Image (cartoon, rainbow, N blue to C red):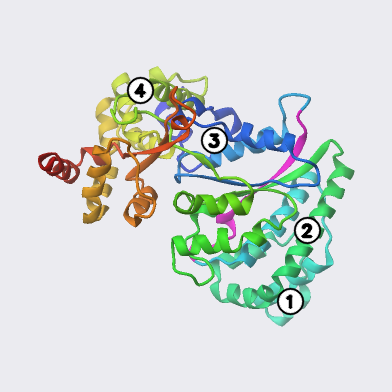
Amino acid sequence: MENPIKHIYNACNPYKPAASECYFDCSKARGSHVLVQEFQRRLALIEDSHFIRFLFTGHIGCGKSSDLGQLCHTLANPTTPSEKIYFPILLNANDYIDDYDTDITDIMLAIVTELAATLRDKLKIELQDNYFTQKLNEIKSFFLSQVDFQKIQLTLPGAKADIQRLKKDPDVRKKVRNSLNPKISTILQEINILFSQARMEIQKVKPEIHDFVLILDNLEKIIGFAEREEGLASQRELFIERAPQLTGLEAHVIYTVPLRLVRADGPQLGQRYGDNPFVLPMVKVIRRGTQEPFHTGHHCMRELLQKHLGNELLLTHAFETEAIDFLLTYSGGHIRNLMVFIQNACTYADNIPISLKAAQLAIQQTVRTYSTSIPTTHWKKLAVLDNSEDQMIPSEDEDYMAMLDNLSVLEYINGDNEDVFTVAEPWYAVNPIVRQLRKFKENKKVLEQQA
């Protein structure tokens, strides 16, 4: 291999979901089922006249997009003859939506245009719909001069680029919402008519496809919705108050939702969507309470990295043993952080194997970030969590919810051989990098002296 460091760096892109050939099942170390199995079993059991509305969550960067990508691959390429073939439509909300200014009409327009564009690009199906063609051309008129508007008429499959422009133009976005929000009930009805048309067209072209599945990734990143206060209030407005619209879509749909919302309002979400959210926890690399290494988790993370490196380069040749152990430990089982650390280590290495020194340098920027950005009020609570016997956090405490968001606290599922309740219970640990910081150690020492 001409440049192994360059190969490692590009194979471990922290912001690129794992392709199917790079995917590794870490469920043994996560303590949860695999998303693919969980969702496919529901598809196999549900009647054809009913639809699944599935909520999926976990820490940002824990591997949700990779799991959704693997689900797309498996839906389209089932592994056994008894499994039906489904056509996945993966919508990346980042392509359409401003995380700090979102409304239900933005999401509905994104669904319509992504459906039409995906059918055109992958199955050569040109959806024709008078209602949405008219609405999309009304929207286009907000962008263009009257002369240009007369020259260019949008078609439904060709509208994707124009709808994506709404993300960057708040003035036009406001005009669109003022035009469409009063008609949201009609829009929902028309979307369901469009879904029926899409099913018929798919059957004509690919009769072996049983149905389509709509997957909305990155919705959990929404911060501001419908002029509500940013954060939890906006997330509640979207996923709880607007649940009638989100569950009114007559299709199998997966929505990614914020972990903070699930921990604050999980039962409400379960009631509105028909089942409790599916949580993808960290890959467990430490044991609950003891901080001792969980070897199954370390093994899974090594196998995952080997998948990314491919057959050309062995992980044992790429890294010194101490270096990869160090990076796995201080990633806390967070996959994106591990990939970031590996890329950083590559910038400090001239050749393989990457050394422990390079690995130590790789985490320094994260050390600086946490040491300067964690609020003063959090340090004591972090120490309290670390000292607690059950390693649980109060869901009503906004500080702990903020810690989940910024990854100073990580969520795990026990995953050991315990009773049916304990084995499924989430627990929380202080980020291993944060545990080494001076302010954390000082607060922990104070607590121990007071005990």
From the top left corner, tell me how far across and down residue 55 is, in percent. Answer: 58, 47
CA separation in Å, label 3 and label 1: 41 Å
First in sequence: mark 2 or mark 3? 3
Badge 2 or badge 4: first in the primary sequence = 2
Which residue is under mark 4? 319
Query: Which mark identifies residue 58?
Result: none
Q: Looking at the image, is mark 2 or mark 1 earlier in the sequence?
A: 1
| Residue hosting label 2 | 192
Return the residue at label 3.
Answer: 18
Name the front one of labels 2 and 4. 2
Q: Is residue 279 visible?
A: yes
Q: Amino acid at mark 3?
A: Ala
Q: CA distance from mark 3 to mark 4?
A: 21 Å
Q: CA distance from mark 2 to mark 3?
A: 32 Å
Residue in the image at 44% along x and 36% along y: 425
Placement of 224 over or under 207, stated as above or below = below
In this rendered view, identify the residue nearer to me: 87 or 52: 52
Residue 150's image quarter? bottom right
How many other residues sit within 10 Å of disc 3, few (<14), some (14-19) or many (≥20)? many
User: Image check: 278 left or right of 415?
Assistant: right
